[in-house]
Amino acid sequence: MTERTAEYRGRIAPSPTGLLHLGHARTFWIAAQRASERQGTLILRNEDLDPQRCRREFVDAMYEDLCWLGIRWAEGPDCGGPYPPYSQSARREFYLDAWCELRDAGAIYPCTCSRKDVAQAAAAPNNDIDDEPIYPGKCRERTDARDFSVPAGVNWRFRVPDGEEIPFEDVHLGSQSYVAGRDFGDFLVWRRDDVPAYQLAVVVDDEAMKVTEVVRGADLLKSTARQILLGRALMLEIPQHYHCDLVRDESGNRLAKRHDALSLRKLRENGWTPAQVLKAARLS
């Protein structure tokens, strides 16, 4: 376990799979303000893990739109810093080290079930269409993890402690609690196409970059419970969490990158000012 700095260190972590929208503006502005108010450091991490979905044009748009909005960072892919690299696509060795540690500890297991298999399993109901379905457990009893020298070729799942309550105190939303095996099941840490999963990558990176507080949307509350379990298995310090209220469309649905009309790029093209964007994101 590395020693966590006493300095406030926050981060914004966009994924370049589409254009940033009002919801991103809200979350990233809050993250920037919390770092500024605490005279801390704001990090920009480019979460470009998925080679099939991440595109250079979205990386360029991300930098431009964030700067236009008035957000500045002290560390990132464009300006460097003490804990490089700041793009996840260049951090594979860190994730492999964590995978090896989890494998050797018996915390993860190889899984040959497809996404379709899991989604269709009767034992895997999930009312949240944006969340990972609860894994039905077909491969859970496998004991051949140590036979694998590399993670490629199968999915790798973290074996959650069924029935254990995972409580945490959110800085903004207060006390939260999820039950492993009920609210979420054995989750992916590495995909069969040899791409590290989101849950593993952010835990490893937040520790390596000495992040003291994670600011992100309330849609990721359940992910925090998963990441607490991962951090515990890797013997890492757990940062504080601040989950922002979500920006929703007229129908009450949270914004997604498919909402092109509400992207920062489209709003800029339509003549909006940064102040108007922040007001629409309910920040002024």
Image: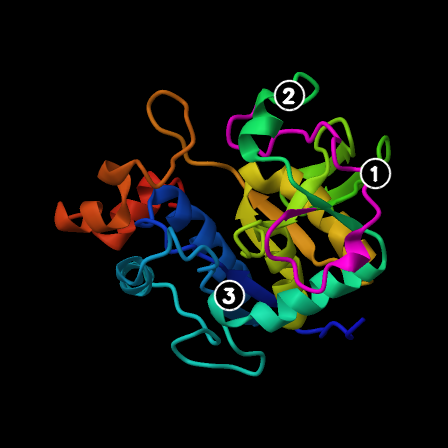
- Whether residue 211 can be seen here: no
Residue type at mark 2? Ala
Q: Residue at x 76, y 26 (%)?
A: 182
Gap in angstroms between the C-alphas marked 2 and 1: 17 Å
Q: Earlier in the sequence, mark 1 or mark 3?
A: 3
Q: Is residue 130 above or below residue 8?
A: above
Q: Secondary structure at mark 1?
A: loop
Q: State which quadrant residue 136 falls in.
A: top right
Q: Nearer the viewer, residue 33 or 99?
A: 99
Residue 272, horizontal then vertical, whole percent: 19, 48
Q: Secondary structure at mark 3?
A: helix
Q: Is residue 10 above or below residue 172?
A: below
Label of residue 121 in the image: 2
Q: Residue at x 56, y 25 (%)?
A: 128
Residue where numbered disc 1 is placed = 141
Q: Which residues are magenta?
A: 128-156
Q: Are marks 2 and 1 in contact (CB under 8 Å)?
A: no
Q: State which quadrant residue 214 falls in.
A: bottom right
Label of residue 88 in the image: 3
Q: State which quadrant residue 120 falls in.
A: top right
Residue type at mark 3? Gln
The colour scheme used to paint the residues is rainbow
Q: Nearer the viewer, residue 121 or 230?
A: 121
Q: Residue at x 61, y 22 (%)?
A: 126
Q: Nearer the viewer, mark 1 or mark 3?
A: 1
| Residue at far left of view | 270
Residue 283, horizontal then vertical, whole percent: 40, 45
Residue 17, horizontal then vertical, whole percent: 36, 51
